[in-house]
Amino acid sequence: MVLAGDFVAGGVGELAEVLGLFAEFTGPKIMVAGNHDLWIGGPPFETWTRYEGAIADAAAEQGFHYVDGGPLIVDDVAFVGGMGWYDYSSRQSAEPVADVRVTPVGVSYKADAVASFRAVPDRGEMSWDQLQASDYAHKGMVWQVAGGTHAAVWNDGIYIDWGRSDEEMTEYFVEKIRSQIAEVAGKANRVVGVTHFVPFAEFAEDDSHEVKRAMARAYLGSARMGEALREAENLRVAIFGHRHRQEVREVDGIVAADASIARDEERPLLLTLPD
Ligand SMILES: [Fe+2]
């Protein structure tokens, strides 16, 4: 059983409770963290401690193998990966709403630990096509359309602080995938990649006419993770989540599965591992 992250938007105690629901499952239990699992309500952010310590401990206590901490080999199958991250490469280039004017906003914390939002200097009231990848680093956006002003924040900007840029975090996870593949090389006949963020650009949603959804696409994942997974010659399946929409497709001969369970009608996916 593989769980691809985003279990809770709360504390590690709740995470342990969720993982504990699978206590009676007797097969190998495998998981990665999701970004929601890293959310901490305010500073000081101890994102690395949460990621490497508390979640790893909760996983171990509940009998899960935490792929973020290292690969797992079950019979002839190696499970490699880790949560992954995003590099804005899947951002929507098409204007979601005609003539929308956008201003990137950044999040910072005041002394009383209350989040405040500030327009990014010299990046105000642009057309959508003037947005650059770097604007998404700020995780917030204010926009004007048809006389109304709206705003949205990508919550990782409020609740997570790696102390590194998103590009650096993407690189960190790409390297994690590579080193895990090297670690299992020659020890397994088949490889299954497990990430939380989406490793294939093919899974980006169609262009949205909602600014909020168009903005969120920047935080989907990174094709660099998929490229790293493919360096395992015997990669058969890639499992991920994050989109809150279950979907299985073949991507260049690999079974790619968004294993999200986010709607009432969605049930756990049962995947058969190809030979
Ligand atoms: Fe997520």
Image (tube, rainbow, N blue to C red):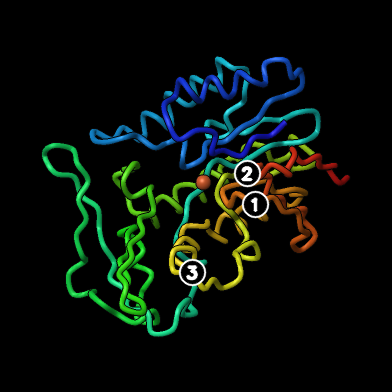
In x, y percent, where is residue 109? 18, 45
- In depth, the one of 101 and 78 nearer the eye is 101
Mark seen at residue 146: none
Residue 26 position by quadrant? top right
Disc 2: which residue: 262
Q: Are marks 1 and 3 in contact (CB under 8 Å)?
A: no
Q: Are marks 3 and 2 in contact (CB under 8 Å)?
A: no
Disc 1: which residue: 245
Q: Is residue 125 above or below residue 160?
A: below
Three-letter code, disc 1: Arg
Q: Secondary structure at mark 3?
A: loop
Mark 1 or mark 3: which comes first in sequence? 3
**C-alpha gap between disc 3 and disc 2:** 20 Å
| Callout 1 crowding tier (Cα within 10 Å): few <14, some 14–19, many ≥20 | few
Mark seen at residue 210: 3
Residue at 57% across, 54% down: 225
Can residue 182 be seen at all in this image of the molecule?
Answer: no
Of the 4 image quadrants, the one containing the C terminus is top right
**C-alpha gap between disc 1 and disc 2:** 7 Å
Q: Are marks 1 and 2 in contact (CB under 8 Å)?
A: yes
The furthest residue to the front: 147
Of the 4 image quadrants, the one containing the N terminus is top right
In x, y percent, where is residue 84? 51, 47
